[in-house]
Amino acid sequence: MAVAQPHARNLRKGRHSQPCQYYFLTVSVAGRRRIFTQRNHAVVVLDAMRWLSGTGRFFVDAAVVMPDHLHIAGQLGESTLAKVMHTLKGYTAKCLAKAGVETPVWQKGYYDHALRDDEDYRIRIQYLIDNPIRTGLVKHAREYPFVILPSWWE
């Protein structure tokens, strides 16, 4: 059973979905379990993000699936953040449950940050790319297998 998080409601305060706006999103696994150490689990999430991008709901520029959470940066299409996250979390939870992952898979809610300018975008993308390095999983970003790198990144 998921533990109630009294601060989760605060994540929604001031949330506004603006089509064409760029966002940085963070989603955590329920109980911060490290379920994405298994390749097949992480691939489910990466494939779902690529699918979302292909549908025009959310254009993923960069993403990283860490052992117990994920970060996504990109542009909202003709949808809302709530619908995008509901689709991503719902679909991946079903797939992961079929693969034997304990439910609930995801914590309730998610963190979103509207990217305000090019510098904000660059800082958030670099944070996302450096996450596996900071946590000691790899020495170089290209070594981490569960990442979608932006086309401009070297």
Image (tube, grey):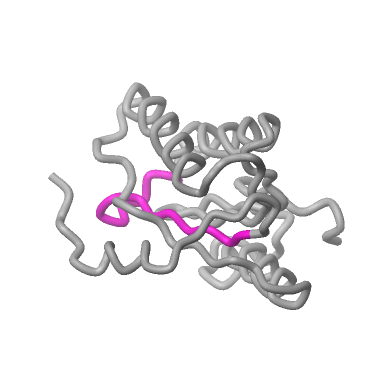
Residue 124 occupies quadrant: bottom right
Residue 49 image offset from top left, x and y in percent: 59, 39
Residue 128 image offset from top left, x and y in percent: 62, 64
Which residue corresponds to the image point at 25% horizontal and 40% vertical from the top-left?
104
Whether residue 37 appears in magenta in the rendering, the answer is no
Q: Which residues make up the magenta segment? A: 23-36
In the orientation shown, which residue stands out farthest toward the top?
Answer: 98
Seen in the picture, residue 35 relative to 22 is either above or below; the reply is above
User: How many discs appear?
Assistant: 0
Which residue corresponds to the image point at 51% horizontal and 69% vertical from the top-left?
135
Whether residue 25 appears in magenta in the rendering, the answer is yes
Report the side of 150 relative to 51 (left or right). right
Which residue corresponds to the image point at 20% horizontal and 62% vertical from the top-left?
5
User: Viewer-proximal residue, 37 or 96?
Assistant: 96
Residue 35 occupies quadrant: top left
Which residue corresponds to the image point at 54% horizontal and 54% vertical from the top-left?
17
Seen in the picture, residue 93 relative to 145 is either above or below; the reply is above
Seen in the picture, residue 149 relative to 78 is either above or below; the reply is below
Q: Give the quarter of the figure containing the C terminus.
A: bottom right
Seen in the picture, residue 24 relative to 106 is either above or below; the reply is below
Residue 83 image offset from top left, x and y in percent: 47, 40
Residue 1 image offset from top left, x and y in percent: 13, 44
Report the side of 154 relative to 98 (left or right). right
